Amino acid sequence: MYTIKQLPEDFIVQEKSTIIPKENGPYLYLLLRKRERTIFDVLQELSRKLRIREKDIGFAGSKDKQAVTEQVISLYRKRKEDVLYVQLRGATLSFLGYGTTPISLGDLEGNGFIIVVRNLDEKSIKKAHLEKIRFSPNYFDEQRFSLHNAEIGKLFVKKQFKEAAALIQEPRFQEQLQKEPNNPIGALQRLPLRLLRMYVSAYQSYLWNETLAAYLRKRGTILKTVSYSLGEFVFVDDETLFAMVSIPLIGFGSEELEKEPEVKEIIAALLEKEGINHNDFIIRQLPDITPEGELRKAFVDVKDFSLSAPEQDELNQGKKKVTAQFFLPKGSYATMVIRKLFAGN
């Protein structure tokens, strides 16, 4: 079984931002380099040390925790002299410039990856080198779901807020919930909005994975299936047939995007199984997290792909390692490319 992220340095992520720094403006742009930390951890620490609100720190996307990552963040009404002295655990900040707009989710072209894959044998490496990587299924991978993210999101959609609140492990939130045990919505409203949205997005992502897997079972020639915590990823060997296919992320109004009868049928069966409908995604108690439907490409272009020659794996005796490098557009998961290459080999 292949291994990734055995060391944080085995998984390097370099964001390609759409932001162009200028010489002045109300927003300060910084390059954040972090190791073994989530973006939310770093933002909490930074807001505390600078005495600013978390929502005044902008970023374009979350990155893997067990990794070394680079991404651009923005701060409102701060000068570099106010910020660069701050010492962060497992993270550093570098000055890039200023601008007139905050960085928001999606303000990136994509990410470059350098990934060391360990614990390999010669057979799996040879098979991977024969693989012509052009497309990869655009599933959401484990990083999206954590321990309970999708389950919490489903409970939000079903308006079971007390049950959802019990699963949120954030210490400050649980302290607030203990003060108001009969007011879970009030406690939830004190959480950062982007964290609440993350839970609903995780549930949408699970539903999308299930939809794509069912679609490929019906329409593709199955190459292999790979289990993960919430189900199975289906890989097919005729990916070019699906290069132009887009699958709706289920949300409020997404039924208008379900043009293909087969996709519509799959989604209808999935919603019945989950015990929900499209209108359940209207969350009036927390209206700012109501998710709309949108289209997501079923397969993603893998650009600038290369796979190194094998080397001795110094961390796993008798095994080999290789290094994969490639670029993916925003919202796509590098770990799916690695699964495609090595899972089940």
Image (cartoon, helix red, strand yellow):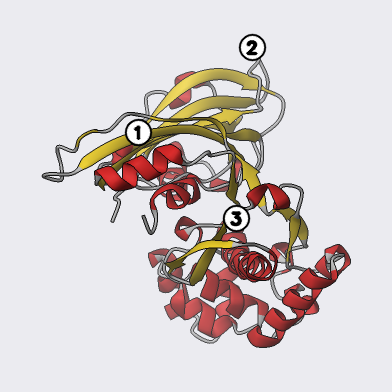
Q: Which of marks 3 and 2 is in front?
A: 3
75 relative to 9 in the view: left or right: right
Residue visible at 41% across and 37% down?
129
Q: Which amino acid, mark 1?
A: Thr
Q: Which of marks 2 and 1 is nearer the N terminus?
A: 2
Q: Which amino acid, mark 3?
A: Arg
**Label 1: how many Cα within 10 Å (few below 14, some 14–19, many 20+):** some
Residue 121: image x %, image y %? 24, 46
**Label 2: how many Cα within 10 Å (few below 14, some 14–19, many 20+):** few
Give the spatial CA distance, label 2 vs label 1: 38 Å
Q: Is 253 situated above or below 180? A: above
Marker count (numbered): 3
Residue 198: image x %, image y %? 58, 60
Q: Tag 2's secondary structure?
A: loop
Residue at the spot of label 1: 323
Residue 148: image x %, image y %? 46, 71
For the C terminus, the image quarter is bottom left
Residue 104 or residue 80, whichever sits in front: 104
Q: Residue 194 carries which label?
A: 3
Q: Tag 1's secondary structure?
A: strand
Residue visible at 64% across and 50% down?
239
Give the spatial CA distance, label 3 vs label 1: 34 Å
Query: Which residue sits furthest left?
Result: 317
Residue 255: image x %, image y %? 84, 70
Give the spatial CA distance, label 3 vs label 2: 29 Å
Asked whether the viewer can see residue 275, the reply is no
Residue at the spot of label 2: 23
Q: Is 343 situated above or below 82? A: below
